[in-house]
């Protein structure tokens, strides 16, 4: 329109940020745009117990779970959905989990935040060894 100034880049971006977009849900920050379940909804067999050495951890991307083993052989499991923006964590270096969306880092042995922007620890999940297999599942309902 004549006499009307063009909108600034800031105005256009602000409008785009406020416009609802269908279908974003949990997949909004996930690489490739896929949506994922946040954690197992039933007990799941993750694999052989021997796959995790004492002091080590293993990431089970397909189930959004990480399992670690302490020096005494005890197992711990955590959801690998980042507590910052609900992105599935897909990288494990030693016992450090790294979120691909904004760089949050977590300790796979205790779920604690090592690097922000996340401020809340990962959710702990029940885990046990059954017949030489690791089984993790949802938290029991009260």
Image (tube, rainbow, N blue to C red):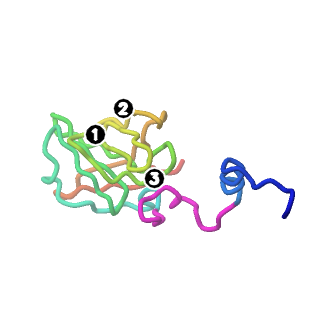
Secondary structure under the numbered disc 2 in the rendered image: strand
Crowd around label 3: few <14 · some 14–19 · many ≥20 (10 Å): many
Q: Residue at x 38, y 50 (%)?
A: 100
Q: Which residue is mark 3?
A: 87
Answer whether residue 68 is magenta in the image.
Answer: no
Secondary structure under the numbered disc 3 in the rendered image: loop
Ranked by sequence position, the earlier of labels 1 and 3 is 3
Look at the picture and state if 45 lies above or below 13: below
Q: Tell me where residue 50 appears, x and y as whole percent.
A: 12, 53
Which corner quadrant of the image does residue 116 belong to?
top left
Q: Tell me where residue 120 appears, x and y as whole percent.
A: 48, 35
Crowd around label 2: few <14 · some 14–19 · many ≥20 (10 Å): some
Secondary structure under the numbered disc 1 in the rendered image: strand
Q: Tell me where residue 134 appears, x and y as whole percent.
A: 24, 55
Magenta segment:
20-36
Q: Residue at x 30, y 40 (%)?
A: 108
Ranked by sequence position, the earlier of labels 2 and 3 is 3
The residue furthest right is 3
Q: Which residue is mark 1?
A: 96
Counting the numbered discs, the total is 3
> Residue 114, which numbered label?
2
Q: Residue at x 74, y 53 (%)?
A: 7
Q: Tell me where residue 110 appears, x and y as whole percent.
A: 33, 35
Q: Is residue 3 left or right of residue 112?
A: right
Answer whether residue 33 is magenta in the image.
Answer: yes
Q: Are marks 2 and 1 in contact (CB under 8 Å)?
A: yes
Q: Quadrant of the N terminus?
A: bottom right
């Amino acid at each position: 329109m004549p006499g009307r100034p063009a909108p600034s880049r800031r105005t256009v971006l602000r409008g785009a940020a406020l416009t609802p977009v269908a279908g974003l849900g949990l997949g909004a920050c996930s690489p490739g745009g896929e949506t994922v379940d946040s954690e197992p909804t039933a007990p799941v067999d993750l694999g052989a117990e021997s796959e995790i050495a004492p002091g080590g951890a293993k990431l089970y991307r397909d189930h959004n779970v990480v399992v670690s083993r302490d020096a005494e052989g005890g197992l711990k499991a955590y959801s690998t959905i980042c507590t910052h923006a609900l992105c599935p964590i897909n990288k494990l270096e030693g016992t450090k989990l790294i979120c691909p969306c904004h760089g949050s880092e977590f300790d796979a042995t205790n779920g604690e935040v090592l690097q922000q922007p996340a401020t809340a620890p990962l959710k702990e999940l029940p885990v046990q060894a059954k017949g030489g297999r690791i089984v993790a599942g949802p938290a029991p309902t009260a």
